Image (tube, coloured by chain):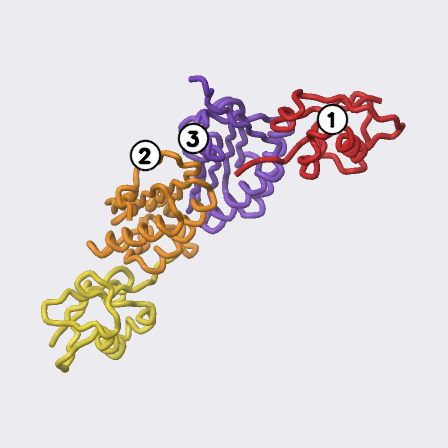
Chain colours: A purple, B orange, C red, D yellow
Amino acid sequence: MSDSAISVQLVTGPIGPSRPLLACDAGAVLLFEGIVRPTENGEPLDALDYEAYEPLTTRELQRLANRTLTDFGLIAMRVEHSVGCVAAGQVSFRLIVAAAHRAEAIGAIDRFINQMKQSIPLWKMPVYRLSND
Amino acid sequence: MSDSAISVQLVTGPIGPSRPLLACDAGAVLLFEGIVRPTENGEPLDALDYEAYEPLTTRELQRLANRTLTDFGLIAMRVEHSVGCVAAGQVSFRLIVAAAHRAEAIGAIDRFINQMKQSIPLWKMPVYRLSND
Amino acid sequence: MVVQVLLFGPQARLVGSPSLPVEILEDRITAARVLATLAESVPQLAASLPASRLAVNHEFAESHTPIKPGDEVALIGMVSGG
Amino acid sequence: MVVQVLLFGPQARLVGSPSLPVEILEDRITAARVLATLAESVPQLAASLPASRLAVNHEFAESHTPIKPGDEVALIGMVSGG
């Protein structure tokens, strides 16, 4: 509902430094960052290549954000997800929520990420190091 | 346990902007900020005045951080808590954890804060607006 | 009618193409019929189809959702990692 | 022996002082004895004492922990909010 309290953005490449989430009367701010790990299934990894299907991906992220904001009574939230190539060690996903108390913030982060992984059209493919280097 | 991966700090007054937590191989970073809310029990609030009992407070925070790091297999964590006066809207507590995956990070933040509120010698007292202004 | 089905991520890589033509010799085509035809005719997708859905014109489809000429049809495979 | 008990936060405010002398006429004084004496003699603390512990020389005390002259004794009331 209060869409102005929600920001959803797909970002090409890695996600840069975080800006503060302005939310009057918030008592708890929780920020989650997903970082590309340097190994996948035991193999060294160079990067992950993320693919979206726009505009469906952004629309579904927005719907999930709206439901999460309403269900947990959040004050504000911001979602950023990479598309394209993100090197190991860099941030590919950031979620910030502001709430009156920490229980809502923790519950919202947990459920948003679980549902995102189940239902949002976002794919990642490993980019492995070339073996002839 | 790996104490170098843990930082615990009491800060006089509000807690400033967050520095990044360096943690190689982390796949998930979770940052929690507790912010002084502008009302307490319905009354407008100017500030909270936090009191610690050093060195017991820092020592118990360090112990709790050690247990949390070990139990959740975290890569690194940083704890900052204010002592003294923190105005409404300012940050009085920040906890950052880095883990391989998000489940450990979320579990660690949740349990650390619950146990901190139960067992760490840290008190807060409301500072209400003067009524004769 | 031939339905062009868009593919993404690991499914596109398995098939080796970002889209796949699916020929269906029926008048009324539904999302369920497209998925069933893919299951029969594209063995590379067999393992991931049970965790996949179709999107028609950028909305997730129900099994009975009709597909008409000109619709944009996409296979949304939920094969996301942790 | 008179044990000076340090107070903090809301408990200090209720009593109106950052410490409180507790007189106990026994040879062997334990943490439990100090808490019991506070419960009997300081009505302002009655409500919060069940959720309080003593620290002796900056370590949380067990009920049988002995208290000797010169020890630093602190009442740690767990009355933290959300």
Q: Nearer the viewer, residue A59 or C62?
A: C62
Amino acid found under the numbered disc labelled 1: Val
Chain for mark 1? Answer: C
**Distance from label 2 to label 3 (Cα)?**
22 Å
- The residue that disc 3 covers is A38
Image position, residue B126 (x, y; %): 32, 54
Image position, residue C50 (x, y; %): 70, 39
Judge if badges 3 and 1 mark residues of a common chain. Answer: no
Numbered-mark total: 3
Residue D17 at least partly seen: no
**Distance from label 3 to label 1 (Cα)?**
35 Å
2 or 3: mark nearer the eye = 3
Amino acid found under the numbered disc labelled 3: Pro
Element under disc 1: strand
Chain for mark 3? Answer: A
Image position, residue C76 (x, y; %): 67, 31
Residue drawn 73% across the image and 24% down it: C5
- The residue that disc 2 covers is B19
1 or 2: mark nearer the eye = 1
Is the residue A53 above or below the residue A66 in the image?
above
Q: Are the residues tagged 2 and 3 within 8 Å (C-beta)?
A: no
**Distance from label 1 to label 2 (Cα)?**
45 Å
